[in-house]
Image (spheres, grey):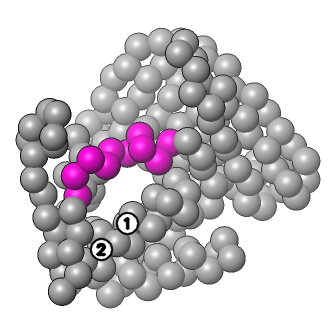
Amino acid sequence: MSRFNTNGVYIWNFGNSFLVTCPKCNNSARIITKDDENSPEVRFSCLKCGYSKEWERKSSGISYCQNANYFKEGEVWIGDAVDWYFHFPLTLQTSCCGQNLWAYNLKHLSWLKSYVSAKLREHSPHQSYGWSNQSLASRLPKWVKQHNNRNAIMSAIKKLEKKVG
């Protein structure tokens, strides 16, 4: 029986790189972040056409948009099928079960694959914070958690894995 422990992983754990669609040539490109105390360094670059761009923070403050189920910090969107900074569409997204299945990068996709394929999903309190409703597993849409969607989701994940080689 495959087991998966859902603890200690949050959506922002996957925010250090994004696979996105280049707005100039429609090929897959990367956004890489480098944490800084005041503001992260964020750079978009497309190896196919050479387009590159630096991100600059425009405002501050954080809010949670319940309708779209994403966080918005200034100009940063967290939890939608776009990167957090430039809002370019993610390369790793596909239609599945009448919904949009997406991942920020291959590490995020691998986590989703492990979660969906597990027969037993274990959840226990965080070592420092206790029980939390902020983990990535607790924030997944219901359709991703449902057993009857497992085969379709796994097929979609395989499709996304092939998309990036």
Are the two marked residues, 2 and 1, in contact with CB atoms closer than 8 angstroms?
yes
Is residue 165 highlighted in magenta?
no
The picture quadrant where one finds residue 38 is top right
Above-or-below relation of 102 to 23: below
Read off the residue under disc 1: 112
Above-or-below relation of 75 to 60: below
Judge by depth and name the residue closer to the eye, 81 or 35. 35
Apparent side of residue 66 relative to residue 152 in the rendered image (left or right): left
Judge by depth and name the residue closer to the eye, 101 or 98. 101
- Image spot of residue 135 (x, y percent): 24, 46
Is residue 14 highlighted in magenta?
yes
- Image spot of residue 72 (x, y percent): 41, 28
**In whole angstroms, how far apart are the C-alphas of marks 2 and 1?**
6 Å
Above-or-below relation of 3 to 155: above
- Image spot of residue 153 (x, y percent): 37, 78
Apparent side of residue 107 relative to residue 89 in the rendered image (left or right): left
Label 1 sits on a secondary structure element that is helix
Q: Identify which residue is drawn at 63% across, 55% down.
A: 19
* Residue type pointed to by label 2: Val
Q: Range of the magenta residues?
A: 6-15
Q: Identify which residue is drawn at 70% across, 50% down.
A: 30
Judge by depth and name the residue closer to the eye, 139 or 129. 129
Q: Identify which residue is drawn at 53% across, 15% down.
A: 37
Q: Is the magenta stretch mostly helix, strand or loop?
A: loop
